[in-house]
Image (tube, grey):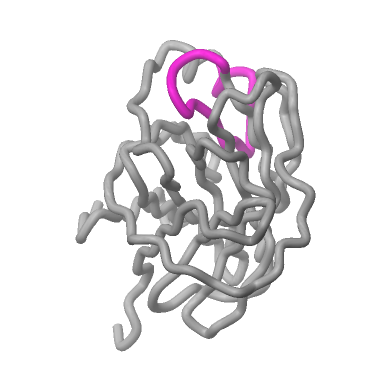
Amino acid sequence: METRRGWRRLATMGAAAVVLAGGAGAAVAVERTAGHAARVPATVDAAAPAKATDRATTAPGPRIVRPYQPVGIGQGAVMALLPEGRQNYVVAWTDVREAVEQAREMVGDDIRPESLSGGINVDGADVLYTGAWRTSTPPARITVRTADGAERDAGVLSLPGRPGWGTYYLDAAGSGTPRGTVTVTAYGPDGEVLATLAYEMFPTGR
């Protein structure tokens, strides 16, 4: 395991790598491995200051899902949000029920108000971005921008009752290993920036 400036890279048996960055959030990722699933608790810290943007807001806001409801997020993975704990969710490729049961026992740590956490799963040329948001205004949209300048809208989830947090995901299958800085931005309904997270994955020049 390698730790550097607020992000961690975890790899299991040469299979998928998970990188986690953000404001001390709690998540469980079940990795794809050769013959078994490994549970990786995520507790990390680092966030970048928000900057204004003139990009228009087009997304309608978070999709409301039931507690523990498995939501397909691409590449065979599912995500489920838990009402127990703080910013508690799972990403699983195998038995999501088992992952949820394990995560229910974790209280977790709050990510900072008006901030994001982030993670990335890399399997060959396929990349899956995931993370959590905690903002007083639910994001109308969340984008992920990679070092090559490409920016994509992520799917956004939340639980019923305006809990003040939720998750996001982006299936970037076939995009190749990300290099340099990844920037995640949450926008409000009027296009204002609610929170920004930047982290470096597989730094350029390596």
* Relative to 120, residue 112 above or below: above
Q: Residue furthest front?
A: 190
Q: Position of residue 154 (x, y in %)?
A: 66, 56
In the image, residue 201 lies in the stretch drawn in magenta: no
From the viewer's perspective, tell me whether residue 102 is left or right of residue 41.
right
Q: Which residues are magenta?
A: 83-100
Q: Residue at the location (58% across, 35% down)?
A: 166
Q: Up-down: is 35 above or below 184?
A: above
Question: Which x, y percent locates residue 124?
Answer: 56, 68
Residue 95 visible? The answer is: no
Q: Residue at x 25, y 51 (%)?
A: 1
- 167 left or right, relative to 201: right
Question: What x and y, as percent, mark residue 92?
Answer: 60, 35
In front: 162, or 91?
162
Q: Residue placed at 48% from the left, 17% from the top?
A: 102
Above or below: residue 135 compared with residue 108: below
Looking at the image, residue 139 sits to the left or right of residue 111; the answer is right
Residue at 66% x, 65% y is: 172
Q: Looking at the image, how many numbered discs can be counted on the residues?
A: 0
